[in-house]
Amino acid sequence: MVKLEQLVKGVLIPATFGKGVLVRQGQLLKVIDVEGKQVCDFFAFSPTDPAEFLSPSHTRGSNGQLDMEPGKPLFNNARQPILLLEEDTVGVHDMRAAACDPMRYGMYDAWQHRSCKMNVFEALQEFNMWPPVFPDPVNLFQNSPIDNQGKLTVIPPISKAGDYVLFRVMQDIIAVGSACPMDVNPCNDFNPTDIMFEVYQASLDDESATGRTQPAVKGLAGPSGFRE
Amino acid sequence: MKIGKLVQRREIPGAHGGGAIVKEGQYLKVIDVDGKQICDFFSFNPADPSEFLSGSHTRVFLGQTLEAPTTIAVGAPLLDNSRQPMLFVEEDSVGVHDWLLASCDSVRYWADYGLSNHRDCKTNVIEALAEFHIRAPFVPDPLNLFQNSPYNEQGKFQLFEPITKPGDYVLFRALRTVLAVGSACPQDQNPANGYNISPIAFEVYDPA
C-alpha cells in the first residue's frame, strides 16, 4: 500500500460530465468510483503539448500485454512512461474501445445525448487546451470482455462504491476524466453516477517512490518480442 | 471478386513507407510480395488528416452492431475516428492481423533493443505523408496487416513470424476517397517479419 500524505486537491466529476486537473510529477492521482458501477473514460495530456497523450496502444506494446497491471507503467504516444499504476481495487478495465461520442448515440437515435468526447473537450477548455486529435481513452472500471467469438462486448462494471485506482504520476500531466454518460447499454448499469479525482502529495519516506522511475537501461525486450 | 483495371501499382521497399490516393469506389490491394512481411497500414482523409482509420472505433462498431470479431472482418466496413465508414474489406487471403499494438518508433529500437539510427514505421509514415504535402497532427495507431502477435489467456502478447506466403493480400474498397499509407515494417530484432525485411505492394484498381 502506498502511504498517502497531504490531499492537494479533490475534483468531483458529476455524473455525465467531464473535468480535468493538473497533476505534478511525483504526485499521486486516485480515481474513485464513488457509488460503484460507473465507468471513467480517462485521459492524460502533456500540459505543454496536447499532441502528447496517454496511449493505450503504446501501453500494450511497451508492456507486452493487453491490460494494465499494478507495478507497471502506462505510456504516452511518444512511448514515455507517464503514469505508474500503484493500486487497483477492481482489476477490470478496458483499453480497447473508443470513447462515446455524438455519432455513437446516433446509433441509438439519441443525437443530443451527452458524450465522453464532448466532456473531454469541455474539460480541456478550462485549461485553454484544444488537442489536435481526440485520443483513445483508458476506460477505468469498464467491463468489456472479448467473447469466445472474438467480439468486443460491454456488460455492467464489477466495481463497488469507493473502488479506485491509484496512479503515481511520472511526468506533469493534465488528467481528464469523464463520468461516462452511457445509459442506453449496460456500460454503467443504466445509471450514470459521479467520479472523484483526488491528488495527493507523495510521502517523503515512501520507499516505493524510489527506484520506480524508468531505468535508463537498454535492451528491455525479451524472447516474446516485448518487455516481460 | 470482379474488379476493374489496374490504375496504379506502387512497390514500397522493405523498411520504407509509401502512399497512394484511392478514390471513392476504387479498390486497394495490399500485397505481401515475398511473404512474412508486416505492413503497418494507415488511411487518412486527404482533405483533413485529423480524420483517419481507427481500430478503437471500428472494434466497438463491429462488436456491437455486426457481431463481428475485434480485428478486420471480410464483408464489414472499417471506420475512421469520427465513426464514419472509410474502407470495406472485400477479401483477405490471410486472416491474421493485429489492430492493438502501436507502430515501432525510434524509442522502441533504443529502449528495447539498444539501437539508434534504426528505421521505424512511425518515421516511415511521416516521410510518406510528406510526399503528399501532408503533416498529420500525430501518427495514428496502425492496422498491422499480416502481423502475427496473438495474446494468451493471461493477456500477454507474443510476436511470431507472419503466416503469409508470397502474394498474400488484403483487398479493400474505398467507401470514400482516402490517402492510404503503408510501411513495410523494418522490425528485424524479433520474428515479426521472419528476420527478413521485404517489400509491400499497393495496387489501385478501378471499379468493375
Image (spheres, grey):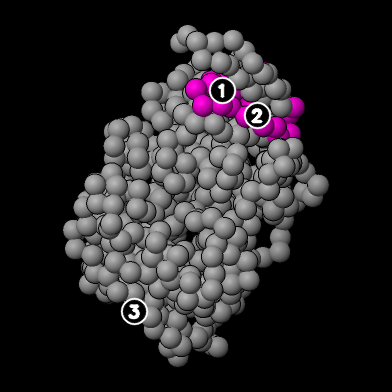
Q: Nearer the viewer, mark 2 or mark 3?
A: 2
Q: Are marks 3 and 1 in contact (CB under 8 Å)?
A: no
**Residue holding disc 3:** A12
**Residue holding disc 1:** B28
Instruction: Check disc 1 and report its element: helix, strand or loop.
Output: strand
Residue B32 rendering spot, x and y as whole percentages: 62, 21
Magenta residue span: B13-37
Q: Are marks 2 and 1 in contact (CB under 8 Å)?
A: yes
Q: Is residue A157 visible?
A: no
Q: Is residue A97 above or below residue B16?
A: below
Residue type indicated by callout 1: Leu
> Viewer-proximal residue, A142 or A110?
A110
Q: Residues within 10 Å of mark 1 (few under 14, many from 20)?
A: many
Q: Identify which residue is drawn at 52% across, 49% down.
A: A57
> Viewer-proximal residue, A37 or A136?
A136
Same chain, marks 3 and 1? no
